Amino acid sequence: MATVDLFAIGNALIDQEFKVSNEFLTQQALQKGTMQLTDGETQAALYQQLQDSQSYKGQASGGSAANTTVAFSALGGTAFYGCRVGNDELGSIYLNGLNDAGIKTAKQSISEGVTGTCMVLISPDSERTMHTFLGITAELSAEQIDFEPLKTAKWIYIEGYLSTSDTARVAVKQARELAKQHGVKIALSLSDPAMVQYARSGLEELLDDGVDLLFCNEQEALMFTNTDNLDAAIEALKVNNQHIVITQGANGAMIIDPSKQFHVAGRQVEAVDTNGAGDAFAGAFLYAINAGLSLEAAAQLAILISSEVVAQFGPRLSVENYAKLFEQFKATQQECA
């Protein structure tokens, strides 16, 4: 298989998006801004209630690392995505969507079973709350992943949501070992406050002895380090991780490397849906540093891309929009030079 810049491993999920009221979240005992795992029967019951009383916004291929990989690829990188889908219509839709975005996948990703689905609930403040039935992706293992492209990749990207799966954590361990053998840099996202709260030991296993690049938001950073201020969290995260990116929503992001740290301002947009914003940020940031841009420029591009994701419904932009925004970004950089 051809060499790729980015090798990613993550869950494969079809998103069903709804605009919901705060009262609906309270009635369903859902914690706003987090992801909750469920079974198929419970999710089906929720889906029926959503259709009966809330506003349906559409279906989209999701999965955190997949969203990141789409952004990376659409900006001009080459990428492979290792995942597990069912041998069903949604599984075909999912893999075809990745291939249409220029991302390589493997036939061994397809297994007998049901493709995972996620109810993405967007409250009036644009925050996303997720109710996820993993389906067959809960059993993602090394058997579904073609590790050959990893040997010549520049980066491997791992989503923190894999922390809940015993078999996925084993696959990630194998991938990390292979990456180290072949000089591939490792990036990982903590993904969600719920993963820090309920799957902490799994996250620690995924992180192992640290990564070259760690993504998290401010809440995740504080929770993971058991600290109550960002400076203390940064010091704790620096112990094992080379570079750290802490996103702060509309306020921008903190960028930390071994010798310095700095803040990059956010970009103001009318927020509609935060689903996929952090994923897009990670994909754009990875693309930029892989292309040789500075950390500051990488953060600026990531903020531009992720803010546009927030300004629409759905976890991804169209492939054409990523490219258009990148051209806009390059023109701005030239004007400032």
Image (cartoon, rainbow, N blue to C red):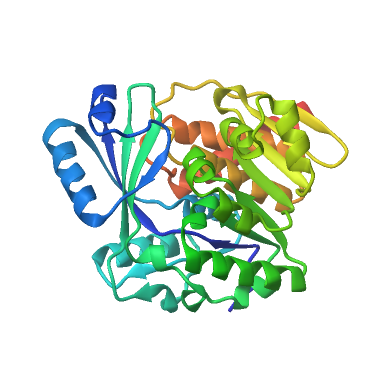
Work out whether residue 305 or residue 183 is closer to the camera in this orientation and state it.
Answer: 183
Q: What's the residue at 85%, 42% (across, down)?
A: 258
Q: What's the residue at 45%, 32% (across, down)?
A: 310
Q: Position of residue 64 (x, y in %)?
A: 48, 50
Q: Position of residue 205 (x, y in %)?
A: 62, 58
Viewport quadrant of the N terminus? bottom right
Can the viewer see residue 182 in this picture? Answer: no
84 in relation to 37, above or below: below
Q: What's the residue at 21%, 49% (across, down)?
A: 42
Q: Position of residue 291 (x, y in %)?
A: 72, 52
183 in relation to 298, above or below: below
Question: Position of 78 compared to 143: left or right?
Answer: right
Question: Position of 293 compared to 112: left or right?
Answer: right
Question: Position of 137 compared to 19: left or right?
Answer: right
Work out whether residue 332 or residue 295 is closer to the camera in this orientation and state it.
Answer: 295
Question: Position of 57 compared to 329: left or right?
Answer: left
Q: Tell me how many marks there are.
A: 0
Viewport quadrant of the C terminus? top right
Residue occupying the far right of the picture: 259
Q: Quadrant of residue 294?
A: top right
Q: What's the residue at 49%, 33% (across, down)?
A: 308
Q: Position of residue 59 (x, y in %)?
A: 28, 47
Work out whether residue 219 or residue 85 is closer to the camera in this orientation and state it.
Answer: 219
Q: Quadrant of residue 253?
A: top right
Residue occupying the far left of the picture: 52
Can the viewer see residue 318 in this picture? Answer: yes
334 in relation to 165, above or below: above
Work out whether residue 287 or residue 156 is closer to the camera in this orientation and state it.
Answer: 156
297 in relation to 112, above or below: above
